[in-house]
Amino acid sequence: MRIRPFGNSLINQIFVFFVLATMLTGCFHHREHQKEHHAPATQQRFDDIELWVKRFEDPERDKWQKPAEVVKAMNLRPGDIVVDIGAGTGYFTRHIAAAVSPSGKAIGLDIEPGMVKYMEEDAKKLNLSNYEARVSRTDDPELAPDSVDVIFLCDTYHHIENRVEYFRNVIPSLKTGGRLVVVDFIKDTDFGPPRDHKMAEEVVIEELQEAGYRLLKTHDLLEYQYFLEFGI
Ligand SMILES: C[S@@+](CC[C@H](N)C(=O)[O-])C[C@H]1O[C@@H](n2cnc3c(N)ncnc32)[C@H](O)[C@@H]1O
């Protein structure tokens, strides 16, 4: 019997329809993924300091954010230099400063001068002389080569634009054995920012691998956020 793959029989027409439909769906799916992969960061500003201080420093946050446990799990050593990118009020930075004292340093970076002012006052109030705060550029944290042991970001990764380029460019600032730690909201939950502002964990991993990092560890500590540790 001769088979005519694209003949006129109904079965052949149905077959061709399914093949084309599958190819098109795959194509759109791929494009959706690409779109997310390169999705621009949310342009949200955090210049209403009073409002954001209330949110970031809400004592209820400690219950699910577990800042002391997160910093403990990062396994920092006294003497480490740690940069907290998008530090906000320094909710984590003060814990980091305590963990690396006395010889180490915590540097809180933020693009909002109001947040940096808040951090500076907080560091003074807490008498943490190894806690520094700086205004940062949106596209470059301007870190000196071979100067940092750990770069930390909590709920900030998805706000950064051109992430692959941004994180590729910070690699030279990491010392040998240096790490990048990312904590951010799980996409498929209603907790935290709206779903379309959140980034899937696998997209973060994929982007950072493209930038030149390798995943070292996934911490299973937080209910609403992934907590990823990368090396170079
Ligand atoms: C959601 S807040 C998180 C604050 C803090 N990490 C915390 O967990 O409480 C995000 C912060 O990142 C800052 N930010 C956004 N884009 C940034 C960038 N490109 N570089 C540095 N900071 C940035 C914002 O101003 C804001 O304070």
Image: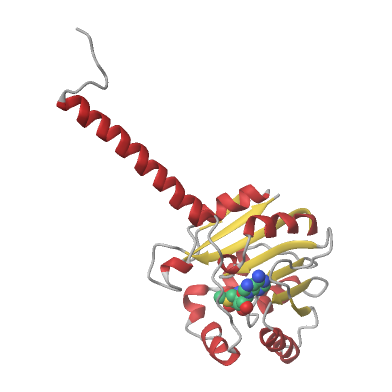
Residue 85 visible within the image: no
Question: Which residue reaches farthest top?
Answer: 1
Horizontal side of residue 90 vs 6, given as left or right: right
Task: Decide which of 91, 98 is in the foreground and name it.
Answer: 91
Q: Position of residue 8 (x, y in %)?
A: 19, 23
Q: Coloring scheme of the render?
A: secondary structure
What residue lies at 71% left-to-right and 54% top-to-bottom? 168
Q: What x and y, as percent, mark residue 175?
A: 80, 56
Give the number of callouts. Answer: 0
On screen, residue 117 versus residue 53, left or right, reads: right
**What residue is rendered at 66% in x and 66% in y?**
152
Ligand 1 rendered quadrant: bottom right
Q: Is residue 26 above or below residue 189?
A: above
Q: Residue furthest left?
A: 10
Residue shown at 55%/64% (left/top)? 40
Residue at screen point 24% across, 29% down? 15
Location of residue 212 with respect to 40 vertically, above or below:
above
| Residue projecting furthest to the front | 8
Quarter in which the N terminus is drawn: top left
x, y percent for residue 93: 67, 76
In the image shown, does 141 or 108 lie closer to the viewer?
A: 141
Classify 5 as above or below 34.
above
Q: Quadrant of residue 97?
A: bottom right
x and y percent of residue 2 in the render? Answer: 22, 9
Is there any visible trace of residue 19 in the rendered image? yes
For the residue pair 86 and 21, the one nearer the viewer reads as 21
